[in-house]
Amino acid sequence: MSTIANTDNWPAIKAAAEAALPASVVKFIASLQGTVHSESHLIAILHLVQAETGWLSQDQMGAVAQLAQIPVAKVTGVATFYHYFRLQPRGRHMINVCLGTACYVKGADKISQRLMDNLGIAFGETTKDGMFSLESTRCLGTCGLAPVVMIDDQVHGPVGPQEVSLILEKYMKLDKAAAKV
Amino acid sequence: MTETMINLTIDAQPLQVPAGTTVLHAAEKLGIHIPRLCYHPRLSLEGACRICVVQVEGFDSFLTACSHEVWEGMNVQTNSPEIRLARRDIVELLLDNHPMDCQTCDRDGQCELQKQAYRLGVRERLFEGKRKRYPVDEASESVVRTPEKCILCGRCIRVCEEVQGVHNLSQHGRGFETVVGPANLGPMDDSACIQCGQCINVCPTAAFLEKDHTERVWQALALPRDVKHIVVQPAPSIRAAIGECFGMPVGTPVTGKLITALRRLGFDSVFDTNFGADLTIMEEANEFLKRVSGGGPLPLITSCSPGWVSFLEKFYPEMIPFTSSCKSPMSMLSTLAKTYFAEKKGLRPDQIYMVAIMPCVAKKFEAARPEHTMEDGTPYTDAVLTTRELAWMIKSYGIDFVNLPDGEFDRPLGISSGAADIFGATGGVMEAALRTAAVKLTGDELGPLVFEDVRGVTGLKEATLTIAGMEINIAVSNGLTNAKTILEAVKKGDKQYHLLEIMACPGGCVAGGGQPYPPSNMDVLDPNLGRLRAKALYQIDVNKQLRRSHENPAIDHLYTDFLGEPNGEKAHHLLHTHYQARTTRGIK
C-alpha cells in the first residue's frame, strides 16, 4: 500500500488553540476529555477564561471550541447570551451604575444615558482608548446616597446628570498625571 | 405489540390516536391543519413561535399543539374566537418587527409568514414598535443572510446541526437583540458554512436566500452574438423538479420543455451537465480501477457534491487523499466548453459565456473557486442559477412553460446516457459508476444495469457486491450527519469500503439547496419529495437507448479526438482538481 499523504490540519489547529488560552484553561479542558457530557462544561470553561484574562476574545472562544470540540457558533452564542461574559477587554476604570430601586427612582436612567452619551459606548462595552468600561449593577447598599455610580472601588453619590462629565474628567486627569510619572 | 390508544375530542369531533401523538398531528387526522412556523416535522421541537396554540378544557392558558401530547379525555378547541385572536396577535407582533417589503421581497408569494398573516386575518398593523436593523451579509458566494427578515424560528439552526452536522448557526444575544448567525455574527464566508443551502430551504421567510446570479445572466443574454456565445447546461435534477414551479405534479420529467425554455430565453448552445456526468464516470471509474489494482488508497470517495467537498476540507481534511480528484460534472463540462468546444467553433475561450443551472447553491461557490478558473483568471463557469432562479427567469420573461414543445440538446456536449440522469438521486453516482465498472471488470458488455441496493432515499445505505469474483463493499450517504457516521467507521477501520458516494443534501441533488420550495401539501426534507423527483430521473434513464456512460459515443469521440486516454495527462490537466484543509475548522 502506498503511503497516504497527510492532509490533516488538526495538529496546527490544536497548537494555535493551546497558544491562545491560559495554560490552566488548556489543562481544565483536557481533564474533561472523555467524561460524560463534557460539552456541558462550556460555561465553566468560559468563566475560567474570563477569570484569567478579564474577557473573552474571538480567538479565545475559537480556541475553546476546537479544544473542547464544541461548535464555535455555540460557544459565541452562549457567551453573548449571558451578561456576565465580557466580549471586550476591561477598561482601566470600571464604571458601575446602580440600577437598584432607590437609585432608579432617583434618576439612574438619566445618569446612565449621560454616561453612554459622554463615553460613546453602551453597557458592557469599553471606550476605544481603553480607559472606561461601563456596567450596571443592582443595589450597592448605599441607598442614602442614591443615585449612585461606583468607579473602581469608589462610590460617588448622589450624582446629578450634570456632574457626570466632572467625575469622568477627574479620572482622566488622574490618568494623565500617572502617565507623566 | 399493541399500541395504547387515547380518546380525545378536537373541535367537538371525537377521535382515537396512539399515545404519544401530539395535538398538532391528532388534528391533522381530522383534516385540520393547525398553523405553524417554527415546527418542522423532520427537525427537533422548538416551541418558539406560538402560532399553533390551542385551547384545552381545564387550562387557563393556551397550549402549543406542536409540543403537547394528547391525553385521555382531552378536549381541544383549535378555532375558538379567543384562539383566532391570539394567533392573529402573535403574527401581528412578528410582522411589527419585520420589514414591510413583501412586494419587493424575493419570497413574495412563497413566504410562510406572509401566508400565515393572510390565513389568520392580519389586515392591519396595530402595534407599531421598535424595529431591528441589521446589515445584509453578502460575503458568501452562495448564501445571503438577511437578519432583519428573521423571525427566530430556529429551523435553520436545527437543519444545520441535526441534518448537516455542521452547526454553523446559533442564536446570539438575548431578548429583542437576539440574532441568528454564524460564530461572533461574523461574515458567512469566514465561518464553518459549507454552503449547502439547506437553511434557505427550511427558512419560512427570506432571512436566507441564494446569491442572485439572474441579473448577470440577463445582461449576458443581451450582448451582441459576435461578442459572446452564451452556453447553458442544466444539471440532471433540474428536469425532475422545475415543472413544480409551473404547477406540474411533483416528479414530472420535463427535459424537452426545459430545453425549449432555455432556447427561448436566448441561449445559443444548450448543452447538458449529463455529458459531464458521463465523463466523470469515465474518469472516476478509471481512478477506481487503478486504485483497486494499484493498492489504494481505498475507499475512493466521490467528489461531485460541492457541499460535501467543503465539508471535507473543513471537517475531514485527513480524508482528502481518499477523495476522487475528478472535477464535478458541471466543472468538467464548463472546462470542455471553453477548450474543446471553443476550439471546434473557432472561438476564443473568453468569447464563451457559460451558465450552469444547478439544484444547488454550493455550485456558486464551486464556480468561484480559483481551482476552477482559466489561466487568465476568469472562471470556467460564469454564472450558476438555481432551479428557483431559472424558474423565475422563465416566468419573468413570460414563457408559457407547461405548453412548450419538446426540444433537444445540442451536440456533441448534449449527448448522454441514462447513467448520467440518475446522478441527481442519492446512490445515482454509485450506480452509474458500478454500471461501467462491472463491464470493465467482467468484460461482459451486458453487465448489470440496476443496482437496487443503492436506490432509495435512506440516509445511509451499504452493500457488498460480487463483481468478477471480487467482493466490493460500497456505501452511499446523503445528509452530512450520515457522512460523519460513515467516515468515522472508515477511520476506525470498522469496515473496509472500496467506494463511497457522499452527497451533502438529504436525499441527494434532487433535494438540493437550490431546488423549488415544495408545494403546499409537502414539506422540505420530506423523503417523498426526494423519492418522487428521483423516480422521474429513473424513468428518464429507463427510456434512454444509452444506459452506461462508456457507451456514450460522444464521450468516446471526445477521448480520441481531444483528451487522449481516460486519466491520461491531458484529461488530468483539464478534468481533475485538488483540495486542501481549510479553516474555520468544523467540529465533528
Image (cartoon, rainbow, N blue to C red):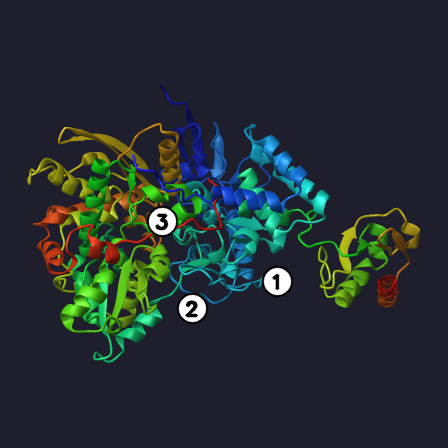
Give left or right: position of B460 versus B34. left
Judged from this view, the residue extending furthest toward the front is A2
**Mark 1 = which residue?**
B129
User: Is residue B262 depicted above or below B433 in this figure?
Assistant: below
Cα gap from disc 1 to disc 2, whole angstroms: 22 Å
Q: Where is residue B193 in the image (x, y as percent from the top left)?
A: 45, 51
Chain identifier of the residue bearing label 2 in the image: B
Q: Which of marks 1 and 2 is nearer the N terminus?
A: 2
Q: What element carries label 2?
A: helix
Give left or right: position of B165 versus B218. right
Going by the numbered disc 3, the residue's amino acid type is: Val
Location of the C terminus of chain A by quadrant is: bottom right
Looking at the rendered structure, which numbered label has been put on residue B309? 3
Work out whether residue A82 or residue B102 is closer to the camera in this orientation and state it. A82
Location of the N terminus of chain A by quadrant is: top left
Q: Position of residue B387 (x, y in %)?
A: 29, 59
Looking at the rendered structure, which numbered label has been put on residue B103? 2
Please tell me in which quadrant of the rendered image residue B12 appears: top left
Cα gap from disc 1 to disc 3, whole angstroms: 45 Å
User: Is residue B75 depicted above or below A97 in this figure?
Assistant: above
Give left or right: position of B467 versus A126. left
Query: Cβ–Cβ below 8 Å for labels 2 and 3?
Result: no
